Amino acid sequence: MLPRDPAQPHRTASTLELFFDLVFVVAVSIASSQLHHALSHGDFVHGITSYAMVFFAIWWAWMNFTWFATSFDTDDWLYRVTTFVQMGGVLILAAGVPRAFDEGDFTVPVIGYVVMRVAMVAQWLRASRSAGALRSATRRYAAGIAGVQVLWVLFLLIPTGPAQIVAFVVFALIEISVPVFAEYRRQTPWHRHHITERYGLFTLIVLGESLLASANAIIDALDEVEALGPLIAISVLTLVVTASLWWIYFWPPHHRAITSFRRSLRYGYTHYFVFAAAAAFSAGIEVELDVLTGESHLSSMAASFTVTVPIAVFLLGVWWIAIKENADRVVNTVVPTGAALVLLDPVLPVPVTLTALILAAVVVVLVLRPPVTREAEAPVGT
């Protein structure tokens, strides 16, 4: 399991990585659905905190596998089997998400998470056998991940309530500090184009949830004749917004954002908010549908904010990690301003209309003002 060449030409995501992502489609879909139900019933605090905790497990497990794969993917039988074990852990986690939301019981999600992470420990230990100068880094990864899993098991002993949330925040901070601890002396290699392609693929997964919400609007319209017009309108507007978010995300050259270890940490960690916001956007659309069909008693303003707040977070996250340093002054003014303006969406009686118009305008600006070119690109890799 030798370290991969960070300058390998034409490296793309493998079929195993694409297969691995499929289980995260399931996990993200269930988490988004549970958030939708909580928000639709007005249970904002519990719904958002539960979603943030569950999505952390989904995001962090995916991210760890992705960065390991860019460094040590051998695609032999043992690597594949270990990856399948991690996939099994994701499915276990996904199965426990409803109970985590409804009862605050994180037993099943933690079991699934630990399964994933123990398999990751095995991968790092295997890599350490032939990592050469990177052996100490791989062993620190293994030790750090294993140690944090003990904390997550102890997490199950903490009763539901504020103490559980505080413990989660502390343990999550320890979890995300493992890469810093492992790589502070020598960094494992990463392929910039491969790693940013993987993030792009996961972005497509979370945006796909919004396309499902758009389809659900049409399905509801077939049964709700009285709300036919608004439901069709929100379906079309959701497609416009989702397409705009796709356009905005893939506008900048993301590989420029991870030219150093510190920048790669910023890129990877900020994506938690980007991914979570994109999946939460679909939940917000479902809330809007509930309001239009009379299945939710939320006010139209509250329902609008379940859509616009995630979009604002998504825009600011993408701008911060990838757009800001590759854009001129106009783009760097328009994108954050657009993030602020979408929060004014409740002023219009038709949901998502103002948001769609603002995002379409942002896309027009991006088309007219392409990313800033550089005289020389830094070499691919660390």
Image (spheres, helix red, strand yellow):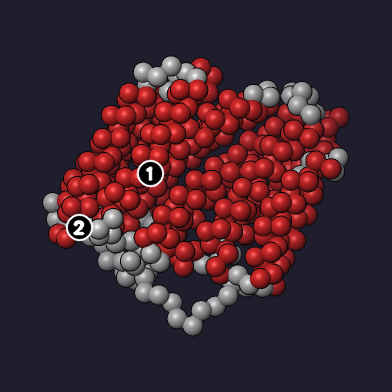
Q: Residue at x 57, y 41 (%)?
A: 279
The answer to whether residue 300 is seen in the rendering is yes
Q: Indicate which disc residue 126 carries.
A: none
Q: In terms of sequence position, does the residue under pointer 1 or pointer 2 come before the other? A: 2
Task: Measure how far apart labels 1 and 2 are at the Cα level.
Answer: 20 Å
All told, the count of numbered labels is: 2
Q: How would you rate the neighbour count of disc 1 (Cα within 10 Å): few for under 14, some for 14-19, many for 20 or more?
A: some
- Tell me the kind of residue under disc 2: Leu
Image vertical order of residue 240 relative to residue 176, above or below: below
Pointer 2 residue: 134
Q: Position of residue 133 (x, y in %)?
A: 16, 60
Pointer 1 residue: 176
Q: How would you rate the neighbour count of disc 2 (Cα within 10 Å): few for under 14, some for 14-19, many for 20 or more?
A: many
Q: Residue at x 46, y 68 (%)?
A: 256
Q: Secondary structure at mark 2?
A: helix
Q: Position of residue 185 (x, y in %)?
A: 25, 58
Left or right of 25 in this view: 110: left
Q: Residue at x 74, y 24 (%)?
A: 296
Q: Quadrant of the C terminus?
A: bottom left
Q: Secondary structure at mark 1?
A: helix
Left or right of 313 in this view: 111: left
Q: Residue furthest bottom?
A: 375
Circles 1 and 2 in contact, beta carbons < 8 Å = no
Q: Position of residue 334 (x, y in %)?
A: 70, 62
The answer to whether residue 223 is seen in the rendering is no
Image vertical order of residue 293 relative to residue 267, above or below: above
Q: Position of residue 356 (x, y in %)?
A: 75, 51
Q: Quadrant of the N terminus?
A: bottom left
Q: Nearer the viewer, mark 1 or mark 2?
A: 1
Q: Residue at x 38, y 64 (%)?
A: 260
- Tell me the kind of residue under disc 1: Ile
In the image shown, does 47 or 108 lie closer to the viewer? 47
